[in-house]
Image: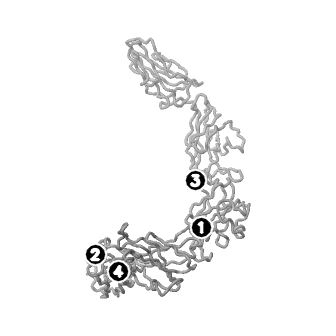
Amino acid sequence: MKVDFKIIALAIMTTILFGCVGTIQDANNDLSKAADSTDNIKLTYSGIVSAVPIANDKVEVFFPQSELDADSTAYVIRYDGLQVPIYVYGTSLRPDYRGLLRFTVSGLRIDTTYTFSIQVRDVKTGVESNNTATKQVKTFANFTANFNGITEVRNLSGDEGTTGIQVVWVPAEIKGGIQKDEIDPIEYQITLIDGTVLNPGSMNDTAFSDPVRKVISAGADKRSVTINGLTPGRKYFVQVRAIHYGYSQFSADRNYLLEKNTRYLQISTYSDDMSSINFDESTFRLTLPPGSGGLYSLASSWTTPEGNFDHYRLYYTLQGATSLTNYLSAEDGDAVCNGTETLNNAISCIPVAANHNLNNLITGLEVNKTYDVVLAICASLRCDKSKRIYTSVFSQTTTPAVADFQGIKSIDPAKSITNLDQITLNFDLPNFLSGNISGYILRYYGNDPSNASPFSVNDPDVINTTGLSLLPYNVMTDTSITITGVDPLTTDQYCFMLVPFSYNFDGSKNFGDTSGIVPKCVLPAIKGPNKNQFPGIDLDASSCDVINSSVTLKWNAPAAGIFSNYEIFSVNDQPSFTFSSAVDYANNSYERLLLNSTTTNYRFIGLQPGKTYRFGILTYYSSIDGPIRSEYNTNLFSCSL
């Protein structure tokens, strides 16, 4: 049985344990002092009405509500032998059917007479009443179950909730094992009365029977029971008591008693009238999921209806294919909601549990299509037309917004001698949670970023007259795009703007909000590696051979930058080495050696003993404007022979 529980709050305050009393008493020390200073203030309260023993260690006391606000009220319970009074705040209590408040005093001694009194205290002023009312009772002479009574009563979901309820309790204390202890529960007795005929005062009056009073038994291992066969839309009162093992042994003794707690809860069965379901249709939301999910799915949310229902169903169809409202008004539909409807295969159905009213997805949809959606609230498992209400038609198109994009961050010139006509645009990935992207359109502004009529480089709907093109890229993962066709020798800058787009349902492009994207420019000059890309000689791998008067230099190929050769510089009998002097061809102190770009080591032989040689290396590229070298580095190698 599928149950959607509506929890009914306890009507009666749970017993406050003595472990908490000291704290409450301590908190009121100042109030006691305040009372001493308010001699002229009187607080009238009639006091305790009755005290009823319900077990060997428990007494229920009943008392009227104070005229003070509940927030300002504490009830002070005293009995003989109690050193610290019990303080019960008014906000924790609820009146019973007679208008009286009830509190269970526990931890008492078996077969003992107690005299109870109850005063009321204004917690704001500390003033306390001073009535003389008392009630004297005696606890049971035999042990009983240690049980606090009913905990919850719940409505069942759907049709079952019109004629049935579930009663829940916390089990009584168990002391024994294989051999039962006297107080161990062996059975629970659940009593239900018709609240339109009887009041809780008749709960245990055996003069009344079914249908106005039902008594149901449950095993000791049970924690709840379902009561069926009730009347729709009817008010009921429910009580639970425990029968203990000792009673099964001594029930013949008329003085041997069961625990007799009077705690009860009230509940009403659901009405079987569909008009009792109250749903605010304006709370229904049909939206697109984040990012590209909106291409293939819809998300729906709504507030929970008031009243009895079993589950929800989402019916949907392509707009124009059929009428959802005509179908739901004329047909019961499939008993099981699971995909395409048998009676109309243009309509699909998704079941939704009664407690799942947020972010329900309709998936497997077509891109850029408009769908009609109706929410049905079903009062029965089958959801036939007499047992459901449904909303108006809501529509949504599977065309999400364009994802947020910050544009080009930087532009790199050519990175390789074989691709001097290429530059690279760098950017951060779009925020795919904010929308979808089908691709990027590159706009070329010439050398003027303020150009009001930029050229499109890769728009399939526009002829490309720029001579530029884009290399393939992955829109979901790539953070750079390479442009080919630039002139590496030009003295004019190139200016670009990268704009994301997505396709609309009619095939047109949606560029979203591009106000935050601006053009970026670059002069595509040929640049050698910087000192990080090419740090020069590998000092650890290079060596000085004094015996053979030779030097072996080693280096690693650059990580980036344009070059066609390596240029090694050497000088001897000089106190220092500087690249600025080395690249000056007028300086005859330096020797220069040009190697091809695939070489990463070189050995100098036949060097003169007694001299000190110093070496450095740069990359080299010959242009019409002169050599282009890598940035000067600090990895200089020296060898004293």
- Give the CA distance from mark 1 to mark 4: 44 Å
Horizontal side of 53 relative to 452 (left or right) equals left
Q: Secondary structure at mark 2?
A: helix
Horizontal side of 179 relative to 537 (left or right) equals left
Disc 4: CA contacts within 10 A as few (<14), some (14-19) or many (>=20): many
Residue position marked by numbered label 1 in the rendering: 311
In front of the other: 502 or 198? 198
Q: Position of residue 465 (x, y in %)?
A: 71, 38
Q: Secondary structure at mark 1?
A: strand
Residue position marked by numbered label 3 in the rendering: 434
Residue furthest right as drawn: 321
Disc 1: CA contacts within 10 A as few (<14), some (14-19) or many (>=20): many
Disc 1 marks a residue whose amino acid type is His
Are the two marked residues, 4 and 2, in contact with CB atoms closer than 8 angstroms? no
- Give the CA distance from mark 4 to mark 2: 30 Å
- Give the CA distance from mark 2 to mark 3: 58 Å
Picture quadrant of residue 469: top right
Residue under the image location 62 percent in, 46 percent down: 499
Disc 4 marks a residue whose amino acid type is Val
Q: Secondary structure at mark 3?
A: helix
Ranked by sequence position, the earlier of labels 2 and 3 is 2
Residue 73 at least partly seen: no
- Give the CA distance from mark 4 to mark 3: 63 Å
Disc 2 marks a residue whose amino acid type is Asp
Residue position marked by numbered label 4 in the rendering: 59
Ranked by sequence position, the earlier of labels 1 and 4 is 4
Residue under the image location 54 percent in, 68 percent down: 4
